[in-house]
């Protein structure tokens, strides 16, 4: 964010840009939606400030992010949702605490630290609530300077035990089928073999899945 935005309204500008992004994800984009969503007394003042400084435009009641505003919103949303993942998956804090602390972390993480966190977490596509995490440069380059905490099942060592963190199926049918077998986020599995098919144990049941499905299951190693 440009220095003058940080100097005057800094944090509130970031918060409102994040709220505009979130509202647009839900198909809303009006000023009244934003003012109802934020519930803060200074919201209208901050909106006027953002219009003046070229972060948003107002056409009647409709709010649009400018190029600069969208770039800032994208980054703050990315930092917030990665922070939620970090707090939930690594520190295993409660959902309410993860949300409140993520709101603070999003204003503190530098671009460099954000990229490192994303790489460490295995470039997660969604936050714990299922909302998409905007992609970063590290996601496109598949950086591996850090050993990722979360990795595809295909990269887990045979004999290892792991916790399922998230699943990125290509269809709801696949997700439903995996769920019916007990393959859901939060479940613990042990990988028995990779060839000719992936064989995992979930609970007391051994299951065989193909490699394409295994690539869509992201896990965190546990003690073997």
Image (spheres, helix red, strand yellow):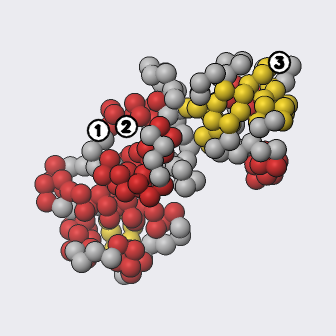
Position of 108 with respect to 136 (left or right) is: left
Q: Which residue is mark 1?
A: 110
Label 1: few (<14), some (14–19) or many (≥20) C-alpha neighbours in 10 Å? few
What residue is shown at x 29% (from left), y 38% (from top)? Answer: 110
- Locate residue 4, reporting x and y percent: 14, 54
In this view, the residue in front, 11 or 201, is 201
Query: Disc number at residue 43?
Result: none
Position of 154 with respect to 146 (left or right) is: right
SS at badge 3: loop
Observer able to see residue 110: yes
C-alpha separation, residue under disc 1 versus residue under disc 2: 6 Å
In this view, the residue in front, 186 or 139, is 186
Q: Are marks 1 and 2 in contact (CB under 8 Å)?
A: yes
Position of 139 with respect to 172 (left or right) is: left
Q: Which residue is mark 3?
A: 195
Position of 107 with respect to 4 (left or right) is: right
In primary-sequence order, the first of circles 3 and 2 is 2
What residue is shown at x 24% (from left), y 78% (from top)? Answer: 41
Q: Which residue is mark 2?
A: 114
What residue is shown at x 82% (from left), y 44% (from top)? Answer: 181
- Locate residue 158, reporting x and y percent: 72, 18
In this view, the residue in front, 198 or 72, is 198
Compared to residue 184, the image places residue 148 above or below, namely: above
């Amino acid at each position: 964010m440009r220095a003058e935005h940080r100097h005057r309204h800094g944090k509130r500008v970031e918060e409102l840009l994040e709220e505009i992004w979130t509202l647009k994800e839900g198909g809303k984009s009006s000023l009244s939606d934003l003012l109802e969503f934020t519930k803060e007394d200074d919201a209208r003042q901050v909106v006027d400030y953002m219009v003046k400084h070229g972060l948003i435009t107002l056409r009647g009641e409709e709010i649009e992010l400018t190029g600069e505003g969208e770039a800032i919103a994208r980054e703050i949303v990315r930092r917030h949702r990665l922070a939620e993942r970090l707090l939930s998956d690594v520190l295993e804090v409660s959902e309410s605490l993860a949300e409140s602390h993520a709101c603070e972390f999003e204003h503190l993480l530098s671009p460099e630290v954000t990229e490192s966190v994303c790489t460490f977490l295995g470039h997660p596509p969604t936050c714990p609530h299922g909302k998409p995490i905007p992609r970063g440069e590290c996601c496109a380059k598949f950086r591996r300077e850090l050993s990722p905490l979360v990795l595809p099942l295909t990269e887990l060592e045979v004999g290892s035990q792991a916790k399922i963190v998230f699943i990125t199926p290509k269809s709801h049918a696949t997700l439903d089928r995996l769920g019916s077998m007990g393959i859901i986020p939060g479940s613990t599995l042990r990988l028995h073999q990779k060839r000719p098919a992936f064989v995992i144990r979930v609970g007391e049941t051994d299951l065989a899945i193909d490699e394409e499905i295994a690539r869509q299951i992201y896990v965190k190693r546990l003690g073997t």
